[in-house]
Amino acid sequence: MLDRGSAPGAGVDRGAPLVAVVGPPNSGKSTLFNHLTGLRQRVANYPGVTVERRCGTVNLPVGPVELIDLPGVHGLSPRSLDQMVTRDVLLGEFEGDRQPDAIVLVLDATRLKSHLMVAEPVLALGLPTLVVLTMADELNRRYGALRRSSLSEELGVEVALVNARDAATLQPVRAFLKALHTGGEEVRACPIVAVAEHPEGRGAGRALPMIDLFAERRQRARELGRSAGFQAPRPSRTNERLDALALHRFWGPVVFAGVVAVVFQSIFAWAVPLMDGTEAAIAASGNYLGSVLPESWFRSLLLDGVWAGVGSVMVFLPQILILFFFIAILEDSGYMARAAVIADRLMHRVGLQGKSFLPLLSAYACAVPAIMSARTVEDERDRIATIFVAPFMTCSARLPVYALLIAAFIPAQPILGPFFGTQAAVLIGLYVMGVVAAIVTAALLKRTLLRGRSAPFVMELPPYRLPTVRSILTRLLDRTKVFLRRAGKIILAVTVVLWVFTQFPRMPGGEAPPIGDSALGQAGQVIEPAIEPLGFDWRIGIGLVTSLAAREVIVGTLGTIYGVESDDEEAFELQAALQQDLDLGSAVALLVFFVFALQCMSTVAIMRRETGGWRWPALQFCYMLLLAYAGAWVANAIL
């Protein structure tokens, strides 16, 4: 059995072995992790660092093994946050986290010479390590060659050739994990190649691998490749043909625009049956509860508050999942990296470097991790500019607002037959507005407050691959959990508080007041004069205030307000209510307001943390609010 007490910082048996999965980006590391752990995964942040971590459990007959999927890195030098996090986890320097008992180092066999550069600093840690070479089938198919035994002898550890997508080839990995429990020759401690004192006095007295000698690691990787008989595979004709189209100066952007059009059309076309089913289920359950519960404050809270508020947001879960379904396909297929290359041509013109594209791309999911991932941008001026414009990217929290208003006020008419319609065109237009605002703002910043030259963009393009069903389903499950967690915490809490404010002051007979006379209505009427020029009433004003917690909260807020206001015992249709209180001009104004406004306090808080003060967050919030107000006023005035 593995003596985990011999690992640094260990003295007693601490349960299941902890194994770190390490490797360069696009090496198949996450695919291997998903295959081994299945749905037994947890997503959280590293202690003290706002970077997402994925942990999972591999259940073996001899006992469980805990896996942690570390960020993809090309080395362990602390030049970026990803490399810093990976290094500190491997050294056991996160408070509350122990050092891993072993490492699974994942490298792409088709790009062995470049990927071997990360092997030496990882092996120098001296932990039991299994080197897993993925893409073994691709190496053979493209007439590449490798002597696995020779490479194993050179590295001093076991080397396995696998196809991360084929569970049948993963037996060597499972044998390695099993040996952590039972002992066996599969587990070998790595030879410590070279050590040096920790830089900047951190972790005094600890040994640290020589991790900064990049030029020496490159030479060593070439030597290892030669000694292992590595023969690079022939270029993939499929990759070359696809790249000739995807990276073409003219056709590349055209293809990208076509992909975007298909995605947004599907959000409306495909989601309608799923949304109708979800809405029917929520309405049926609400009607059932209304029929069995006696008249009481609890019944009113449950139906008018929780069911009307949270249910109004839950209806849009199918649209969000369809969006992330396409994002998963584009990322796993390798196309998203090509989109980054296409976008880099524009990024340089506005003064940003290509590395800013990936954080901005992730902002379409959420601005918070996008701002955190901007730490990979090494130039400080470019990093601040990237953080500043990230909230202009249309995050998934805006999608319920967009979908609600577009469905209510934009008629569904075909533009290109069944392939593209007016609602999808308006949705694309809102996304484009956010992108244009980001580009203009970035150009303005780089010519004034953040003047400077951008660094060149270097990116390793992964090969095209067919996405796996398991990988896509795992991502969709993760997004569902995140959405339900937000609905179960933020939206639920807001709707309950709003319902309470609709119940006071009580009428002489002890009844709840009309909503316009309630504490909530009175608060909204204080706000109303400021937003009346935009075509908004007090109900929208309350929604704008509550959506500072999270953008989609406005949908739950309006659902609660109209649910309490309605005398209809049936489920109140939010779209119909909005059509009574808003016209086309005010509805478009509300859409424009949400394109530009920074309606997310989590984003403000993380920006304060990333920039080290309130200067940039305050400027960002005021700038975006002014832009949102002006844009909404113009839209309402014109329409």
Image: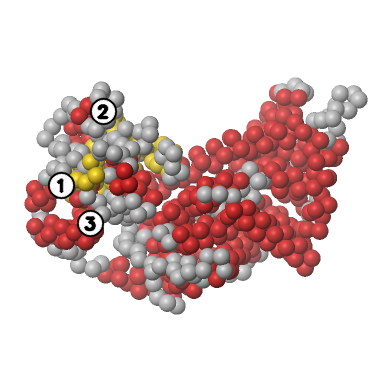
* Residue holding disc 2: 10
Q: Quadrant of the C terminus?
A: bottom right
**Is residue 77 shown left or right of residue 388?**
left
Residue type marked 2: Ala
Give the class, few, some or many, for how many residues have Cα within 10 Å of label 2's Cα (few <14, many ≥20): some
Q: Whole-percent x and y of residue 70? A: 34, 45
Mark 2 vs 1: CB contact within 8 A: no
Q: Nearer the viewer, residue 264 or 437?
A: 437
- Image height of 449 relative to 476, above or below: below
Q: Residue at x 76, y 62 (%)?
A: 633
Residue type marked 3: Leu
Mark found first going from the N terminus, 2 or 1: 2
Q: Secondary structure at mark 3?
A: loop
Q: Residue at x 29, y 25 (%)?
A: 14
Front of the two marks 3 and 2: 3
Q: Secondary structure at mark 1?
A: loop
Give the class, few, some or many, for how many residues have Cα within 10 Å of label 1's Cα (few <14, many ≥20): some
Residue type marked 1: Val
Q: Residue at x 29, y 35 (%)?
A: 99
**Is residue 86 shown left or right of residue 403?**
left
- Image height of 31 relative to 1, above or below: below
Q: Quadrant of the N terminus?
A: top left
Q: Whole-percent x and y of residue 310? A: 64, 38
* Residue holding disc 3: 213
* Residue holding disc 1: 193
Q: Secondary structure at mark 2?
A: loop
Mark 3 vs 2: CB contact within 8 A: no
Q: Whole-percent x and y of residue 536? A: 79, 53
